[in-house]
Each structure stands twice: as structure tokens, then as C-alpha cells.
Amino acid sequence: MSKRNENTLPRQQRRAALALILMGAAASLGWKLTPTTSLSTLHGDFQLEQVVPKQFGDWRMDEAAVGGVVNPQQEAMLKQLYSQTLSRTYVNSSGHRIMLSIAYGNDQRDGLQMHYPEVCYPAQGFQVRSNQPADLAFANSMIPARRLETVLGNQRYEPVTYWTVIGETVVRGGVNKKMVEMQYGFRDLIPDGLLFRISSIDRDAQQAFLLQQRFAENLLKAVDPQYRRRLAGLVA
């Protein structure tokens, strides 16, 4: 056998072996990304109405506020996308108001995934003038969030802060989200998901963002530690 044939054979064997490995990985990937166990059932009962306090620190729920929160979809679509939603307006002793909206879905597979403020606000007639990443400090952790500057008819200026949780991990961006979903898929888990949105009416966006960050920090401090991870990916 010539040296050329001797060199060719190992290369062919290596290629065949690599092909088998890739085929096996693809088959495994296809099986793993069709998970059968719902993460929400492992987490146990999770009721937003009970988990999120109506009063904490200097903030209390404004029982009289109605219709202040911009709903991302019509009611029928909300029921299809999410298993739970919570919309409240809070007020502090200085008269500042914060609108809180939380949407929770127990199945985040394709076709049942949440809709984001940069999509649903324009659907309500708003312009999104700015969309920037922001890391919110909480204790010794950081929450990777996004901040939007929105306006409706050049009259209602509504800065928005939001973040997304897949399972127990806060994600920012489609690639990060898909990677986390795949990680759960490899563990045969169907991840749940949560969108945590804070907004306020304020022409001064930077002032609004600072107030929203303080609000989020105070709220999360008041939440039972066992639920912080599900609301914001925080271990403690």
C-alpha cells in the first residue's frame, strides 16, 4: 500500500468517526430538546397575588388606580401566552407612582413565549425612543435588565425597566435566552418564564429609572427569599 493510501485511510476513518459523533449528538439533541418534565411542577405553587406584597417600605398599592398599566396584548392573547398576570400601581409618601406588571408562563417553548415591551408598546401606539441594557444592583448580585424610553402622542412619557427570567435564570437577549432554554432541555425540563416590568409617567427618564431601581430593590427585599429566584434570578 502506498504512503498516500496509508495517509488517506486514517483521514477517512477520522471523518467517518466524526460523522458518527455528530449524528449521535444531533439525535441526542433532538431528544433532549423535546423535554417532558415541567419545571413549574418541580418549583411548586407560585401565586403572584400572594408572592408580591401590596405594601413594603415607603410603597403601598394604590387601590383606586384603574387602567394605568399598558397591557401588552388583548385579554384573549394574554390568556394564551401566560398562566398568570399581575398589574398594580404603587404610590409612595412623596406621591410618586410606579406601575408594576408581571407576566408568568409555565411553558416557554416556541409558540408560547412572552412578548416584550419593545414589541407590545408600539402595538399600543407608543414610540420607543431608546432601548438600552442596564445592570441593576441588588445586594451582591446584578440583574441584567433593559431600559426603554417610550412616548405616546408626544404627551405620555413612560420610561420602562424590565427583565426576563427563564426558569431560575435572568436572560437578556435572544441568544442568551435560547442557550438557557437548551440547557434546561438537556436536563429534560420545560422551563417556565416571567417578565417583570416597571414603568412610570415622567419626562425625566433618568430620574424615573433611578426611582424604578429603588422600587425594585425595596420590593425584592420584601419578597420571601424562596421566591426571589423566580422573580429575579436571585439566590438570596
Image: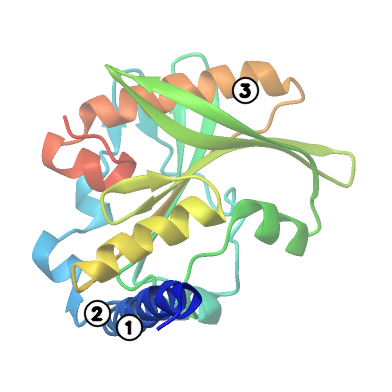
Residue 146 sits above or below residue 67 on the image? above
Q: Amino acid at mark 3?
A: Ala
Mark 1 and mark 2 in contact (Cβ < 8 Å)?
Answer: no
Viewer-nearest of labels 2 and 1? 1
The one nearer the camera, 114 or 203, is: 114
Q: Amino acid at mark 2?
A: Pro
Residue that carries the numbered disc 2 in the rendered image: 35
Classify 10 Å Cα crowding around label 3: few (below 14), some (14-19), many (20 and above): many
Give the spatial CA distance, label 2 vs label 1: 24 Å
Residue 185 in the image, given as x and y percentages of width and height? 28, 70
Q: Amino acid at mark 1?
A: Leu
Residue that carries the numbered disc 1 in the rendered image: 20
* Helix, strand or loop under label 2: loop
Residue that carries the numbered disc 3 in the rendered image: 208
Residue 111 in the image, given as x and y percentages of width and height? 50, 81
Q: Quadrant of the N terminus?
A: bottom left
Residue 19 sits above or below residue 196 on the image? below
Q: Can the viewer see residue 59?
A: yes
Classify residue 233 as left or right of residue 112: left
Give the spatial CA distance, label 2 vs label 3: 41 Å
Q: Can the viewer see residue 190?
A: no
Residue 143 in the image, given as x and y percentages of width and height? 40, 31
